[in-house]
Amino acid sequence: MDAAFVLLLGGSLVRFLTRDAGDNRTGWILALFLVFGVLYLLGRFWAPAPRRGGRPTTRYLLWLGAVLAVWVVLLALVPSATWCAMPLLFTGLHNLPVRTAVPLAAGLTALVVASEVRVSTGVFNPNLVIAPVAIGAVATAVLVHSRRQTARQRLLIDDLFRARRELAVAERQAGILAERQRLSAEIHDTLAQSLSSQQMLLQAAERLWHTSPEAARGHVRDAAEIAARGLAEARRFVRDLAPPDLAESTLVPALRALAEREDRPGLAVAFRLDGTPGALPERVGTALLRVAQGALANVREHAHATRAALTLTCVDDRIAVDIADDGRGFDVRRTPRPGPGRTRGHGLPAMRLRARQAGGTLTVESAPGEGTTVTVSVPLAPDSAGKDTP
């Protein structure tokens, strides 16, 4: 629009010099052309247009009023200045409110029509009226449509930013819930089980303190060892590192050490290895070890079993851990679920969650009086997804 203004202003000046120049007003008109052009161009920097949707500043309104006043005077002296109306219409009026811009556009169009009719000669030409009105109407329609489109786009952009903010809040809340769930499973599988074992050992030591001091001291030593491991787990929470067993070795030695720790009087735990596991992702190794810990803790506390077997099975595309016992078993369809006021019943849901997060499945097979077998199986393919099996 600025380039069009300069070209049209130059054309009007050339037309004036070739057709209308020669009287005493020529110098004043040339000076007026110069003032008109300089005022327009300088105003684009001195009085910048308001942002879309913003109110025009006082400086902008003063500049626009001065440019229009000089143009009206120039139009009265040089009818060819009518060609400068279109750039003025777009560069000036499109930044004004519609209720102000439309009447001003109508006024500019009326001035152009009056100027054209005033200098016309011979038979009246209807195009002198129709053409400016049509051009002004089209320009005004484009202006109004542009305003409406701008308003719609602004609303869409506002909605987009609001949706992005709401999505960010929702993702943050989901992350907080997922982290709480992860910490709940970690605490249940490590610290809670450790404290439960210590409690059982110390209670047994208290019962045997006078009748069998050596056995009582053995229980106390076992409780101290469990307390040391619980302390290591608590420190891991702070450091957010891998489980201590996996940090110091691979999954096979970690499971073997777990079976040796759980092998105590009253419960014989054996470890078996079927196949040779390769390098595992940390999340898979951690999930298998935690499920084994949770399952053996359930065996020790609830199954009343005398024997348990911890088996690691490795095939080409899958790795699995089985924990089987000869305890009293239970009805899988009536597995207790955690709820308000319950302090137990988090073991199986936590194991299912760990299996799912590792991309695997958890299967529980049990019946009253027939023992229990817990199997967690994780596919080694990167695109595998986990599902729960009741």
Image (cartoon, grey):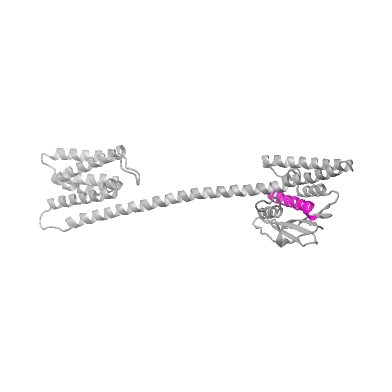
Q: Is residue 261 above or below residue 373?
A: above
Q: Residue at x 30, y 46 (%)?
A: 95
In the figure, 250 relative to 45: above or below? below
Q: Position of residue 348 (x, y in %)?
A: 71, 55
Answer with the quarter of the image where residue 389 lies.
bottom right
Between 278 and 293, the one lying in front of the other is: 293
Q: Chief secondary structure of the magenta span?
A: helix
- Image quarter where the C terminus lies is bottom right
Q: Position of residue 235 (x, y in %)?
A: 70, 39
**Is residue 286 on the magenta stretch?**
yes
Would you say residue 273 is visible in this rendering? no
Is 99 placed above or below 365 here? above
Q: Quadrant of residue 336?
A: bottom right
Q: Residue 345 at what x, y percent from top left?
A: 70, 53
Q: Is residue 210 left or right of residue 323?
A: right
Specify whether 17 is left or right of 231. left
For the record, the magenta segment spans 274-303
Does 223 sit left or right of 339 as displayed? right
Q: Is residue 100 visible?
A: yes
Residue at left offset 23%, top offset 45% = 9
Number of residue marks: 0
Q: Position of residue 146 (x, y in %)?
A: 33, 52
Residue 99 inside the magenta-drawn segment: no
